[in-house]
Image (spheres, rainbow, N blue to C red):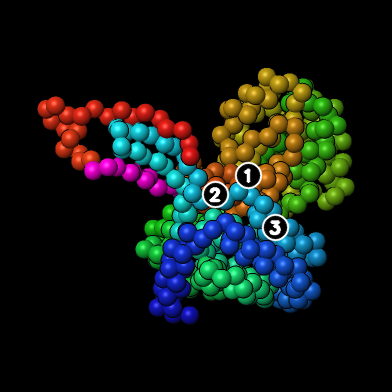
Amino acid sequence: MTTKMIHEIALTAKAASLKLAHLSVDIKNRALEEMASALDAACASILEANVRDLEVAERENISAPLFSRLRLDENKVMGMVKGIRSVVGLDDPVGRELMGMELDEGLTLRRITCPIGVIGAIFESRPDAIPQISSLCLKSGNAVILKGGREAQQSNKIIVNLIRDAICKVEGVPIGSIQMIETRSEVVDMLKEEKNINLIVPRGSNDFVKYIQENTRIPVLGHSEGICHVYIDSKADLNKAIAIALDSKIQYPAACNAMETLLVHESVATNILSSLVTEFHRVGVELVACEEVRKIVPGIKLAVEADWNTEYTDLKLSIKVVSSLSEAIEFINAHSSGHTDSIITEEATSAEQFLNEIDSSSVIWNASTRFADGFRYGLGAEIGISTNKTHARGPVGLDGLVIYRYKLIGTGQTVAEYSGDNAREFKHNPLPML
């Protein structure tokens, strides 16, 4: 596909976004229901396409985390369907009033949510990201240009075709609302479309996200790494701690919200580490640890400095003993990627300090880091996780895909009336929300 063709795709998306911005919620929900039904009916065909991708991936010997993200089964396809339908049940994020102000008599200002416009969504391996991203963009009134990983090419194609055919059945929804590109060279060209694309959302490895950030003038929303921590406090319930630590690491180790470093307070380290290490070894987790851990449980490989700053996305874990809650907080803020960090404790004061002082997009008390997810948070789904400190942070659902505009309604006022001698005074009276 040529640069000119990518430009045409971006122009088509922009034109579609202008129509999507004004669609009624009923029309958007009908389109989403058609999308869900299409995927449900074509489950077998989706899985057949995925098998072809997996066969190629095996021959090319792709990494275990990528292979895990690539693999679909019936449960994952039904999860796609359920995810789309959960978005149907959410309130329309467009057209909500955020602020009302009477500037003066007959002069009112309101701040109203509106779509961002065109989203460029670039992701590796995961074909189930397509319905998540597409449903969120459609419901929030944004057009989307999708770019999935080469390793998921067959799966991506069939899912996108099913979705595009589905929305064509609903009058008013422009076909250009959801488009897909396929090659790296097309991504390079897409990153130059700052006049037509309003936001890039990359999902993938640290190097991948950094590449996107460094090669476009389009705003980028995402996270470069998922270095997540669990801290077992001196006042932790040890049975809870073991269950939560295991879930945070092994439930789905390829996820960006999986635990990569476990911190244990020195007062409970002797009581819990042997049991934890046994359980981790039982399921094949490779462990590296500080000297204090190695004294309690001999035979574990010594962690090096790089381990504390590594996102493994695999069955590998770093473990460190700390002497206090303050040391744990300091360590996490120094090494966390700002994604998700959890404390296990029965002491509410310690938990509150942790939740307030850890500088991450999700902070958790007595629960697994794996809960940091758009669907689990009740956002319907997520277009990605953001560690930015801009308009959206954490799992980015519908609210993260709208911005706002100001609507000023007057009755003939001019600025000259409010300037110079005998100027009128602004009232600036807050108005009730409509």
Asked if residue 336 shows in the view, the reply is: no
Q: Is residue 370 magenta?
A: no
Report the amino acid beneath label 3: Arg
Which residue lies under the disc numbered 2?
A: 93
Can you give x and y, in whole percent of width and height, for residue 176 in the image? 51, 71
Mark 2 is surrounded, within 10 Å at the Cα level, by few (under 14), some (14 to 19) or many (20 or more) other residues, namely many
The magenta span reads 402-412
Who is closer to the viewer here, 202 or 375? 375
Q: Tell me which residue sits at (72%, 62%) in the image.
A: 81
Asked if residue 121 shows in the view, the reply is: yes
Q: Which one is earlier in the sequence, the residue at label 2 or at label 1?
A: 2
Report the amino acid beneath label 2: Pro
Report the amino acid beneath label 1: Ile
Disc assigned to residue 85: 3
Q: Tell me which residue sits at (60%, 67%) in the image.
A: 148
Q: Is residue 12 left or right of residue 419?
A: right
Does residue 364 lie above or below 323 as drawn?
below
Q: Tell me which residue sits at (57%, 51%) in the image.
A: 92
Q: Which one is earlier in the sequence, the residue at label 2 or at label 3?
A: 3
Disc assigned to residue 227: 1
Helix, strand or loop under label 1 = loop
